[in-house]
Amino acid sequence: MTLFLCPIYLLDISQSWVPAGMSTASQNGGSGGFQRVKRGWVWNQFFVLEEYMGSDPQYVGKLHTDLDKGDSAVKYTLSGEGAGTIFTIDQTTGDIHALRSLDREEKPYYTLRAQAVDIDTNHPLEPESEFVIKVQDINDNEPKFLEGPYTASVPEMSPVGTYVTKVTASDADDPTYGNSARVVYSILHGQPYFSVDPKTGVIRTALPNMDREVKELYQVLIQAKDMGGQLGGLAGTTTINITLSDVNDNPPRFAKSIFHFRVSESNNVGTIVGTIKAHDLDIGKNAEIDYSIIPGDGGAMFDITTNEHNQEGIIVLRQLVDYETKKAYTFKVEASNAHLDPRFHGYGPFKDMATIKITVMDEDEPPVFTKPSYTMDVYEDTPLGIIIGAVTAQDLDAGSSPVRYSIDWKSDLDSFFEIDPVKGTISTNELLDRESIAQHNITVVATKVKNPVQTSRVAVTVHVLDINEFPPEFAIPYETFVCEGAKLGQVREEPIAALLNIILLQCLNEGLTAGVLVLASNMF
């Protein structure tokens, strides 16, 4: 007997079997046990079309055995995956139908078992055999980008063909059947700036010298289409947001060529005079700027540093300025890129220069004495009102103010001196005694008439000189003795302890006619 799986053609005839106790003769009306007979099971796979939308159950195939004489003596049974729920078999005809629509992406095949049974004895006429019903794919799934939308970046000014990123789309259809899962990539929006490889999905630059400072952000729309991109294929899309990253391709530029500032002559070293800024179209590290002063007129009077937060150049006072000495300074400042990119040297010098003009502002300053200190000499007992010297102070400011002089009373409590408030001459106001005070230290104050709060002070030292007002005096009284008869012109000076003996001996030896003068002093 032979069992056919329709519509599959019978390909081979192999040995069959009959149940034990039943012979071929028995099957033909005789008697005997089971014997092997030839049968024709050819178990190829059946196919069922996925997503079937018909109103009737979908026909899958037919089971048939040559023992079936068409007299309804054979019953066909079906077991396994989906038997009775998804697949059903007509027990009489062996026709198999799918009861509902199937999705290959949910389950691609079903494994079942078929058997032909004698309807009267319920004995199997054929051994139970396994076969597969495969769900045949249709193009019912569009390609999907599982990781989109994408974000990528590429340096500006990149050459054509520079790699940007790669996109990948997946198609759930059967890649082994037809072109349902063969995906082709294309750009729907984003040309002529970028290109995509139709097979790999690699995105590359397609336009040279794209400038971030002109356009920084690009949105590219990529399509993935199955059926090899042919008409009728399903498609999915994704977006790639591409940012041009910055490179150092722009020099710093000053907004104007001349900057004007003012500084007061009273400002201290380190005072901020002003700030300047060169603008760089680049960003981040590529926009960092170094400022420097070009040597020249007045450049040594100032310094410049870079504010790392806003890239401003800060001009500070390096040395004190004086309006009366120099009223203005002019010098040049250079702004240059801190980090040069050798690839862009051909773009020109990455620096710019500007002129700085600084005006010194006059301040109302105290008078200035012509000397840091003064020294004067005067003899003691000099009469009152005698001029012993003079001090001089000047107002160096523009529109010079007259100066008035005075002596700080704390430095001359006894008023030994007085000063002419206009001329600055110093004269005696009391008799001076060197033996009492040999040196006087006084302080003279100069005050501006137009602005009395502006004062200066200077030290004046007065030395009192000695005069010969006292005759010489012996420190102790002396007694003199002379012997009679001492020789003329002879002078003796001895300690008082030995004086009397000397005088006595002298007198005894030489007599009283010589003239001898003996000075006795207890100092010796």
Image (cartoon, rainbow, N blue to C red):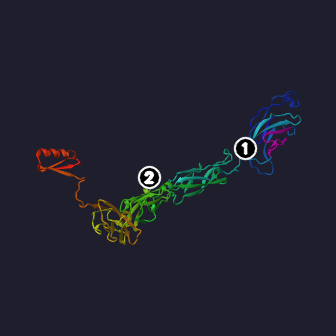
Is 2 or 448 nearer to us in this picture?
448
Using residue 294 as the reference point, say whether residue 209 is left or right of it.
right
Q: Nearer the viewer, mark 2 or mark 1?
A: 2
**Residues rendered magenta in the picture:** 74-98
**Disc 2 to disc 1, C-alpha distance:** 60 Å
Is 296 or 376 nearer to us in this picture?
376
Q: Is residue 190 shown to the viewer in this render?
A: no
| Residue 400 placement (x, y as % from top left) | 36, 71
Q: Which residue is mark 2?
A: 342
The N terminus lies in quadrant = top right
Question: Circle 2: is it few (<14), some (14-19), or many (20+) Cα within 10 Å?
Answer: few
Question: Circle 1: is it few (<14), some (14-19), or many (20+) Cα within 10 Å?
Answer: some
Residue 194: say if magenta.
no
Is 370 or 445 nearer to us in this picture?
445
Using residue 191 as the reference point, say whether residue 507 is left or right of it.
left
| Residue 371 placement (x, y as % from top left) | 32, 63
Q: Which residue is mark 1?
A: 108
* Amino acid type assigned to the residue bearing label 2 in the image: Pro
Using residue 203 as the reference point, say whether residue 399 is left or right of it.
left
